[in-house]
Image (spheres, helix red, strand yellow):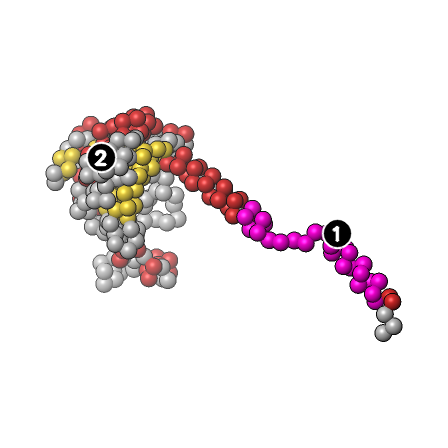
Amino acid sequence: MYNKNGYPNRSSGSRMWHGMSSSLPCGMSQYAYQDTDFSSAYPSRRMFDMPPSSSTLGGVGHMYSSSTSSLTGCNGSGTNLIVNYLPQDMTDREFYSLFSTMGPIESSRIMRDFKTCYSFGYGFVNYLTDEGAQRAIKSLNGVTVRNKRIKVSFARPAGEELKETNLYVTNLPRTITEEQLDEIFGKYGLIVQKNILRDKMTGKPRGVAFIRYNKREEAQEAIAALNNVIPEGSNQPLTVRVAEEHGKQKATQFYNSTMNMNMNMMSSMHYPPPSSVMHRGRARFRFQNISPY
């Protein structure tokens, strides 16, 4: 039996989605994972036979692992790829169709803003075999898709290699775009992720951005080349530093300001000397003893 949406009737799936469909992001259908076996740690066999839908957050029947930075698949080998410089209007179905020609895919997803569904311009593809991943890098790296030359490489492993790859940049032009940010910082290595901070009211850039490189060496090269350099369209030199150092500095400033505020509050409070309190206490005690009332 099939329901009105063309999917088999599954009572367990209906119960699972009951109460959840109202909170699904970006209009995701409650049937988005109709063919996924949630009782298993890995996707069901059937899901590999159908491509994902054009849903903005994920493909139909494709589970997406939260560990997108891992190099290893379930067989312990390099199967997880990161794809950069994707067209902004590329759908997940197109993304899957492009990379599925290289081999069977376990999961694929274009990374998007959770609320707006705006594409960040990169995604992840996890193949079932090493051969599929290597074939994708060899055949698709550098391919032009709608005036965008995509870059395909192995995703980085989590751990020590992630340290000191995220940069904090200030004094950027207030008219900076993501394309201009790529032009300035893309010369020094592969940009895995970038985020221009914007004013909450106007939506305009605040002149601040975070840029994450693929390797620590690339981040260090960008710091050496761009720190204290005045970019085109600005009258202030850039400040480029490792984001971790910026976080430590902010924490230190907050701690020092808090301590200074506490010290100022304590110094402004007046406490009478202990001797005067004791003297007044003795005086009251003697007065009460000699009073006839």
Is residue 10 or residue 67 the one in the foreground? Answer: 67
Can you tell which of label 1 and label 2 is closer to the viewer? Answer: 1
Question: Which residue matches tag 2?
Answer: 231
Residue 277 is a magenta residue: yes
Cα distance, mark 1 to mark 2? 66 Å
Q: Position of residue 292 (x, y in %)?
A: 87, 72
Give the mark count. 2
Neighbor class of circle 1 (other Cα within 10 Å; few <14, some 14-19, many 20+) is: few
Q: Residue visible at 32% across and 27% down?
A: 220
Question: Which residue matches tag 1?
Answer: 275
**Amino acid under disc 1:** Ser
What is the secondary structure assignment of the residue under circle 2? Answer: loop
State the mark number for residue 251.
Answer: none
Bounds of the magenta segment: 263-288
Neighbor class of circle 2 (other Cα within 10 Å; few <14, some 14-19, many 20+) is: some
Q: Earlier in the sequence, mark 1 or mark 2?
A: 2
Q: Residue visible at 41% across and 34% down?
A: 245
Q: Position of residue 276 (x, y in %)?
A: 73, 54
Q: Quadrant of the N terminus?
A: bottom left
Residue 75 is a magenta residue: no
Q: Is residue 239 left or right of residue 278?
A: left
**Amino acid under disc 2:** Pro
Q: Is residue 277 left or right of residue 21?
A: right
* Residue 111 seen in the current view: no
Q: Position of residue 41 (x, y in %)?
A: 39, 43
Main secondary structure found in the magenta portion: helix
